Amino acid sequence: MAKSSQTSNSTLSFIKLTRGLVWLVYAYTVIAIVFLVLGFVLLLLGANADVPFVHFVYRIAAEFLQPFRGIFPPHQISDRSYFSAAGLFAIVMYSFFSVALHSLISYLTLKQAQYDKELERL
């Protein structure tokens, strides 16, 4: 009985640690999506890159866009605005990854609740 309780405690600790790490990656992807969407919209609307806020958003979004850069060429819409298909593709890919992480968090939360109930019975 004590061995089972110890195994359940270590399993529960592992689930909690894993869940915490997945939450961190999930938060990273949500932040990436926010900056990519902001950068996409600002680029589409031809925002002035000399403005500090716009420059900051472009710089951060460029880091998240790096794995997708070069997949699709940007299309110039007017003299200052561009449509970034790579940016839109990155938003979609980060969103799919975010949904998968959300599902994993839900699964780990369910497992954590099951192990909590098992420990209460012991």
Image (cartoon, grey):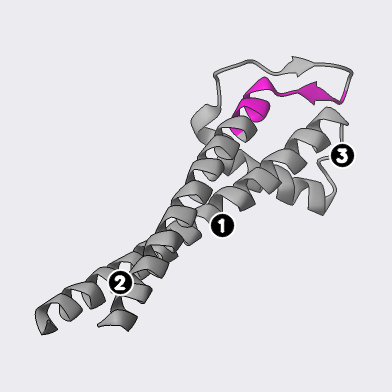
Mark 3 Cα-neighbour bin, 10 Å: few <14, some 14–19, many ≥20:
some
Q: Residue at x 43, y 54 (%)?
A: 107
Q: Residue at x 53, y 28 (%)?
A: 68
Kind of residue at disc 2: Leu
Q: Is residue 96 left or right of residue 9?
A: right
Position of residue 20 relative to residue 122, above or below, is above
Q: Position of residue 35 (x, y in %)?
A: 69, 46
* Magenta-colored span: 80-90
Say which amino acid is labelled 1: Ala
Q: Amino acid at mark 3?
A: Asn
Instruction: Tell me, yes or no, whether the highlighted magenta stretch contains residue 86.
Output: yes
Residue 50 at x, y percent in the picture: 83, 44
- The answer to whether marks 3 and 2 mark residues whose Cβ atoms lie closer than 8 Å is no
Image side of residue 83 versus residue 100, left or right: right
* Residue denoted by label 3: 48
SS of the residue under disc 2: helix
Which of the two residues, 76 or 21, is positioned nearer the viewer here?
21
Q: Select label 2 or label 1 by which is in front.
A: 2
- Callout 1–callout 3 Cβ contact below 8 Å: no
Give x and y (percent) for residue 83. Answer: 77, 22
Do the CB atoms of the residues marked 2 and 1 lie less than 8 Å apart? no
Q: Nearer the viewer, mark 1 or mark 3?
A: 1
| Residue 12: numbered disc | 2
Q: Which residue is mark 1?
A: 27
User: Residue at coordinates 42% horizontally, 69% vertically from top-left?
Assistant: 113
